[in-house]
Amino acid sequence: MLKLKPLIVLSIILFAVTLLVPSILVLPFKEEKVTGKLGEMVKPDNSSKQVSTGPSSDSGVEVTVFRMAKSSLEKMTLDQYLIGVVAAEMPVDFETEALKAQALTARTYYVKQLMNPDKTGLPDGAQVSDTVTHQVFKNKDELKQQWGSEYERKMKKVADAVKETDGQILTFNDAPIEATFFSTSNGYTENSEDYWPNSFPYLRSVESPWDKKSPKFATQTVLPLGEFERKLGIKLNSGKSLGSVTARTTGKRVGKLEIAGKTFTGKEVRDKLGLKSSDFTWSLKDGNIIIDTKGFGHGVGMSQYGANGMAAEGKSYKDIVLHYYKGVQITSADGLLNKVMARK
């Protein structure tokens, strides 16, 4: 057997260690490789640890609002516009999921307005106004004045609701819907054709029991008999019946009624008398007409207090909109916005 001198053995050992050390040092820092489909090498999924810092879909769209009181145009990004609409249209102390549902309706309305413009009261260059003709809007300065010391907290809450629904709209047959909403139902929403001329398959009557907890659920209006007659264009003879309801809508509001020989729709009476809802009853007492109403608003589409009630029970904004708008889809607005921009 060949005998190696101690010095030679030591040299061999040191040489081997020199070769191994770089591999030992590098190995723990090599990226782990995972075998994917058909043996393709793919990186581990670390998406849950990554936060997107890129621009949102909403921030890439410019909106021009006609400020009615100042008779001026104000430009901003879509996310800024939606924050101002949600803050103006829904109580900010509502549940976050209800605010998200409101953001979704507001964005849907804007996209539909771009595709099929309603130019009522708009000057050249404006896309929407800041009133109920389109959507009520308040800018940051107006909200600062309104909210005072609560501005930062409330602004963050609304901004988060808008951001978490970024780019999403409601569609039916690939087109943005008429995303109508109102404050409080009488326990049911209305079919669109029971209040307006047009029938929409997604604006169907649904139950909304959460509204009964709304502070706007019940209202009483007192009108002197003479004013009641004048506004309706009728004359009630002494002791004559106050009339009767001859038809109810699917949403259990007044469909038609006859009074003093004339026929009215519930909507006509509501409009003429300035009532909160078209679900009403009335009586005569001491020369006054006492009118009790249930609900607040036209009743078509999403009930805001109903949405808040659903959210309080743990329902998501998706659950809310799919309850109030039947058969709709939640989709990205990018494709539709691209079509609009291509026309210009």
Image (tube, grey):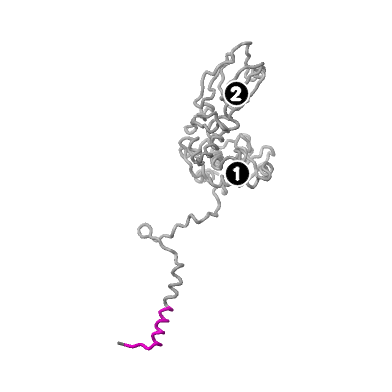
Quadrant (top left, top right, bottom left, bottom right) of the N terminus: bottom left
Query: How many marks can you see?
Result: 2
Q: Is residue 114 visible?
A: no
Task: Report if residue 187 lies within the magenta region.
Answer: no
The image's mark for residue 83 is 1
On the image, numbered disc 2 is attached to which residue?
292
Q: Are marks 1 and 2 in contact (CB under 8 Å)?
A: no
Task: Report if residue 4 lies within the magenta region.
Answer: yes
Residue furthest toward the left?
1
* Callout 1 amino acid: Ile
Q: Is residue 164 visible?
A: yes
The location of residue 220, given as percent across then percent down, is 62, 25
Give the camera-side residue of 182 and 122: 182
Magenta segment boundaries in residue numbering: 2-18
The location of residue 140, given as percent across then percent down, is 65, 45
Distance between mark 1 and mark 2 Cα atoms:
35 Å
| Circle 2 residues within 10 Å: few <14, some 14–19, many ≥20 | some
Give the camera-side residue of 102 and 117: 102
Q: On the image, which quarter does residue 136 sit in? A: top right
The location of residue 223, given as percent across then percent down, is 66, 21
